[in-house]
Image (cartoon, rainbow, N blue to C red):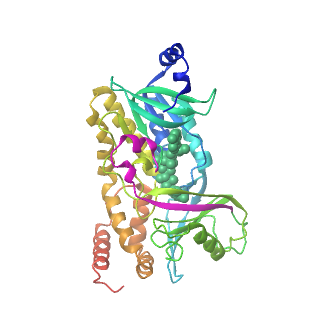
């Protein structure tokens, strides 16, 4: 990596090397995963750098479960809407409403949410630097040298030394590609959405500020789903697919027409990849650990990633803390082990669900019809809002399991 300041003069290089900042941990990426890792580490008194390129607002539907609000102390001021039901729309246009019950789905705006998380980490003692990570180099003493393009102060290339690095730089993680075997093979859905001004109350648009609409129609997405998510003054209208021959902007234009929001003023148009499956390895066996989208922790079928990124950041902070104490790189593996123990089963089931039910319009039709079942609704909302496998209603779980299995094996007609 070219570093003008290091190369300028021998004396300059010495001065620069002497002045290089040293940290216990450098966290790359200040989204939900990285900012939470830095927050937790700083609160423990760890000397931590949080490096964020500050390039753009993260494209995101912004739906988070109440469990995220409680567990990660998200203040009410960050919640721009509370959703009380989801409407599932089948290829035939059949609609099934799923009321959330006595809880809610919280909507956050990432243009305010991410800066809030970063500021919180800084207030706890993390050093927040606006800069774009470029390269890491392992040092003979076991530390890692990180080089980044500084976007504040004098600018130019800069470097720091850290005993451990957390790569929380999203689905296209540069840290992952440079340090963790297999990270360059992360499979993704490409998701795209348009942020529009929400319609006035009483408008003709098919829109409710407290209802998320989820469209399961092959014409809008051949292998995922399309959505309309309310965000207070705004709404996110989006779609996604892993297929290369698919045009998300065309699908979103069609959806906007269908719901009567084709003329709503557009605030932003943006897209980004959503990982489809957690990586098999999250660390380099030396000093680098990935968290959040960087290691693929997004729930299949739903594309929900914010809660898992917040949790992944926390688990990464715990594992790195153990690594700093023991100096045993095996401690880094604990993050994945603990995450998969908590959510591995749900991710596996959701992966099967996506592969089977999102495979054709015929199956989507049956899937939406299944959502009428009060037990399906109850179990879906319980597991989404609480992020725990529901222990109640075991008979309902067994019944749904066998109904699902029958569909998978082609034994059932309905
Ligand atoms: C269109 C769309 C809609 C979605 N809707 C939802 C939803 O409704 N609910 C939900 O739960 N999830 C949703 N997701 C998924 C969710 O956005 C992600 O799973 C979540 O943001 C992951 O958090 P993260 O911190 O791991 O990564 P990110 O949020 O991607 O954060 C990574 C951070 O790293 C920074 N960075 C990247 N490269 C560098 C670098 N070289 N140097 C320094 N910093 C760098 C970025 O600027 C960014 O701030 C959606 C995703 C998309 C694309």
- Total tally of numbered discs in the picture: 0
Say which quarter of the image contains residue 210. Answer: bottom right
Quadrant of the rendered structure where residue 60 is?
bottom right
Instruction: Give the quarter of the figure containing the C terminus.
Output: bottom left
Magenta region includes residue 191:
yes
What residue occupies the far bottom of the structure in this picture? Answer: 413
Residue 404 sits above or below residue 194 on the image? below
Foreground: 183 or 341?
183
Q: Is residue 180 above or below residue 124?
A: below
Picture residue at 40% right of the left edge, 75% below the top: 359
Q: In this orientation, which residue lies closer to the viewer: 333 or 44?
A: 333
Q: Which residues are magenta?
A: 171-197
In the image, residue 223 lies in the stretch drawn in magenta: no
Q: Is residue 259 left or right of residue 372?
A: right
Q: Is residue 188 above or below residue 40?
A: below
Locate residue 299, reporting x and y percent: 41, 58
Q: Which residue in the rendered view is the most extreme toward the top?
A: 11
**Residue 66 seen by the camera:** no
* Residue drawn at (31%, 34%) of the image: 286
Residue 25 visible, this orientation: yes
Expressed as whole percent of the image width and height from the top left, the position of residue 57 reads 60, 48
Q: Residue 76: where, in percent of width, then height? A: 58, 47
User: Is 130 or 384 nearer to us in this picture?
Assistant: 130
Q: Is residue 360 left or right of residue 412?
A: right
Q: What residue do we see at 50% from left, 59% from top?
A: 103
Spot occupied by residue 159 in the image (x, y as percentages of width and height): 49, 27
């Amino acid at each position: 990596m070219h570093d003008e300041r290091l190369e300028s003069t021998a004396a300059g290089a010495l001065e620069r090397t002497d002045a290089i900042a040293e940290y216990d941990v450098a966290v790359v990426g200040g989204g939900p995963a990285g900012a939470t890792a830095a927050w937790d580490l700083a609160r423990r008194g760890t000397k931590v750098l949080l490096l964020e390129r500050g390039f753009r607002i993260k494209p995101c539907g912004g739906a988070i479960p109440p469990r995220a609000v409680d567990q990660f102390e998200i203040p009410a001021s960050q919640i721009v809407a509370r959703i009380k039901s989801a409407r599932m729309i089948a290829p035939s246009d059949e609609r099934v409403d799923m009321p959330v019950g006595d809880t809610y789905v919280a909507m956050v705006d990432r243009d305010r949410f991410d800066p809030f998380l970063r500021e919180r980490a800084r207030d706890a003692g993390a050093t927040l630097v606006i800069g774009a990570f470029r390269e890491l180099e392992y040092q003979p003493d076991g530390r890692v040298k990180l080089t980044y393009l500084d976007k504040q102060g004098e600018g130019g290339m800069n470097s720091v030394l850290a005993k451990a690095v957390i790569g929380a730089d999203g689905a296209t993680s540069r840290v992952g590609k440079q340090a963790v075997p297999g990270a360059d093979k992360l499979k993704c859905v490409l998701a795209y959405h348009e942020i529009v001004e929400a319609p006035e109350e009483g408008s003709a648009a098919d829109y409710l500020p407290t209802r998320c609409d989820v469209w399961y129609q092959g014409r809008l997405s051949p292998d995922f789903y399309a959505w309309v998510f309310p965000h207070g003054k705004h709404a996110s209208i989006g779609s996604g697919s892993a297929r290369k021959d698919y045009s998300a902007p065309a699908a979103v234009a069609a959806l906007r027409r269908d719901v009567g929001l084709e003329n709503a003023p557009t605030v932003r148009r943006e897209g980004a990849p959503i990982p489809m499956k957690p990586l098999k390895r999250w660390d380099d066996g030396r000093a680098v650990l990935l968290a959040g989208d960087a290691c693929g922790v997004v729930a299949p079928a739903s594309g929900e990633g914010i809660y898992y990124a917040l949790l992944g950041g926390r688990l990464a902070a715990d594992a790195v803390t153990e690594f700093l104490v023991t100096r045993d790189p095996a401690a880094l593996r604990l993050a994945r082990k603990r995450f998969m123990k908590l959510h591995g089963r749900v991710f596996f089931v959701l992966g099967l669900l996506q592969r089977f039910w999102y495979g054709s319009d015929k199956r989507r039709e049956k899937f939406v019809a299944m959502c009428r079942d009060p037990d399906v609704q109850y179990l879906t909302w319980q597991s989404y809002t609480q992020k725990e496998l529901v222990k109640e209603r075991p008979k309902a779980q067994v019944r749904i399991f066998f109904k699902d299995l029958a569909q998978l094996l082609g034994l059932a007609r309905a």
